[in-house]
Amino acid sequence: MGEHALTVKTVRDGPVCALILSGDLGLTETDGFLGPAALAVDNRTERLVLDLAGVTFLDCAGVRALAMAASFAPSGCPVIIRSLSPIARRIVELLGLDLANLRDLSPGQELQDWLRDGGTTQQELAPAEPGTAFLAGTEGCP
């Protein structure tokens, strides 16, 4: 494991589910985030909190993974980004993303079901063709 290996801690307080991330959230770490997120977020979740204070690296694939995790929340469930680290904040600013609408940037329930059944995200996160954006608003990412 690297110096900044991703860890995901799940804290549930009744209907509130918090995912606390520490370390790097990039292409190679997305499965390590989305797997636990798919298992933690369920129909009992009334508020999803993504705590990014400990994120030391974030790339376009990591942003897409956050959007995917947000889409796991039930319809009408607010998704709150808490404690955005300076590094993560800079990437979000460079991409011009609106984190209040993070859920709108990703696929939905089918992906969560697929991950719960043991699927991986590597194919989902790679663009189909060179120059294809990962998601709307990330056209500037390689």
Image (spheres, rainbow, N blue to C red):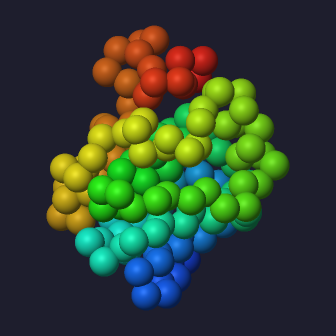
Residue 104 lies, in percent from the top left, at: 40, 38
Q: Is residue 23 visible?
A: no
Q: Give the quarter of the figure containing the C terminus.
A: top right
Give the quadrant of residue 112: bottom left
Front-most of 119 and 21?
A: 21
Q: Residue furthest right?
A: 86
Residue 59 lies, in percent from the top left, at: 61, 38
How many discs mark residues in the rendered view? Answer: 0
Q: Which residue appears at 63% of the width and 65% of the height?
A: 51
Front-most of 94 and 13?
A: 13
Q: Is residue 74 above or below residue 135?
A: below
Q: Residue furthest front?
A: 76
Residue 12 lies, in percent from the top left, at: 47, 84
Q: Give the quarter of the figure containing the N terminus.
A: bottom right
Q: Residue furthest bottom?
A: 14
Residue 34 lies, in percent from the top left, at: 40, 59
Q: Is residue 27 left or right of residue 35?
A: right
Q: Is residue 44 left or right of residue 11?
A: left
Q: Is residue 90 above or below residue 134?
A: below
Q: Which residue appears at 46% of the width and 69% of the height?
A: 47
Give the quadrant of residue 117: bottom left
Q: Is residue 91 visible?
A: yes
Q: Which residue appears at 56% of the width and 45% of the height?
A: 100
Q: Is residue 70 left or right of residue 117?
A: right
Q: Which residue appears at 47% of the width and 78% of the height?
A: 16
Q: Is residue 14 above or below residue 97?
A: below
